[in-house]
Image (cartoon, coloured by chain):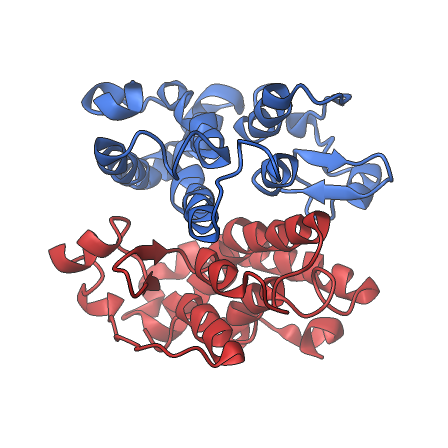
Chain colours: A blue, B red
Amino acid sequence: MQDSGNCYKARLAIAHQQLPCEMVPIDILTGESRTPAFLARNSNGRVPTLELTDGTFLPESNAIPWYLAEDTILMTGDPLSRAQALRWMFFEQYSHEPFIATIRFWLALAPDPESHRVQIDERRPGGYAALDVMEQHLGAHDFFAGDYSIADIALYAYTHVAEEGDFDLSGYPRIHD
Amino acid sequence: MQDSGNCYKARLAIAHQQLPCEMVPIDILTGESRTPAFLARNSNGRVPTLELTDGTFLPESNAIPWYLAEDTILMTGDPLSRAQALRWMFFEQYSHEPFIATIRFWLALAPDPESHRVQIDERRPGGYAALDVMEQHLGAHDFFAGDYSIADIALYAYTHVAEEGDFDLSGYPRIHD
């Protein structure tokens, strides 16, 4: 799905490595991720889902870049820095996406944004809390885990469209740079 | 924190390998994860956080078992099965914990469960959806990614206390076994 930050993570990992692949558009707004055919590929009904040439399916927006990055410069080197990359990727899924991506989805993609106003207001502080954690880290580090890696891809995906969810990034110069 | 499923993941990975470690209790209910001293260890203010002997801190309940499991039998072997383990660990953080762990927290640990009744009712279907995905997978596989691994640790942590959140597991024989 073109507008999905989660799909963007996979596309960015693929583009960095110029991997040959076929993109199959799935529109979650019209239920295409909940059809029997799609659920047979990913029982959790979410995009992106990677299909390998042997017919294996790999779901999850952060597991796909991890798999594609093994043994490339997008993967951090030693076990501790790999774990730190994962730390930021789990942070992205639990402490960032439910706030920043979900609010942006409601405001920029879903029909009738105002019907989600209460939830948007409830989730707004969690989004800024995630941005605070990122800003603090980037004050002392150029990237999230060692050099540019899949951790940066994971966090860039929805942060770079956070303003579509009415997040004001003007107080976050490190993130903005 | 003894009652935290996220801390339990780290303890289980440590126990499996009989690693020497010191446990430092942090009570999130009294704000101990939000003190300046704790935030200096993990700016996201969450438990568990692992401190290594060199003073490095590694946050995130699924990144810690991953790090501790590198080069052990708890880590799945080839790149694809490692990615599938991660797939289930990201599933746990995004599609399982916000429903099953959060409802259990509100009902079993937090003060005044009834004040969360609307949120509990809103999140209940997401919890059963996660259990459905797990049950379906376990109908065709003994474990989540190859042999018993950190993916099973991640999903066991909150599933084995789901009944404290009033989830009825009687319709989930594979999970129950």
Q: Across the whole image, how many numbered discs are drawn on residues? A: 0
Residue at 31%, 39% in the rendered image = A130
Say above or below: B134 vs A30: below
Residue A61 position, x and y percent, is 59, 37
Q: Residue furthest left?
A: B36
Residue B86 position, x and y percent, is 60, 51
Image quadrant where one finds the N terminus of chain A: top right
Q: In this view of the protein, which residue sits in the foreground, B93 or A153?
A: A153
Residue A127 position, x and y percent, is 32, 36
Residue B82 position, x and y percent, is 65, 53
Answer with left or right where residue B149 lies relative to residue A25.
left
Q: In this view of the protein, which residue sits in the foreground, A78 or A28?
A: A78
Image quadrant where one finds the C terminus of chain A: top left
Answer with left or right where residue B51 lies relative to residue A62.
left
Q: In this view of the protein, which residue sits in the foreground, A42 or A156?
A: A156
Say above or below: B159 vs B20: above
Residue at 43%, 46% in the rendered image = A81
Residue at 43%, 65% in the rendered image = B6
Say above or below: A143 vs A92: above
Answer with left or right where residue B172 lies relative to residue B23.
right
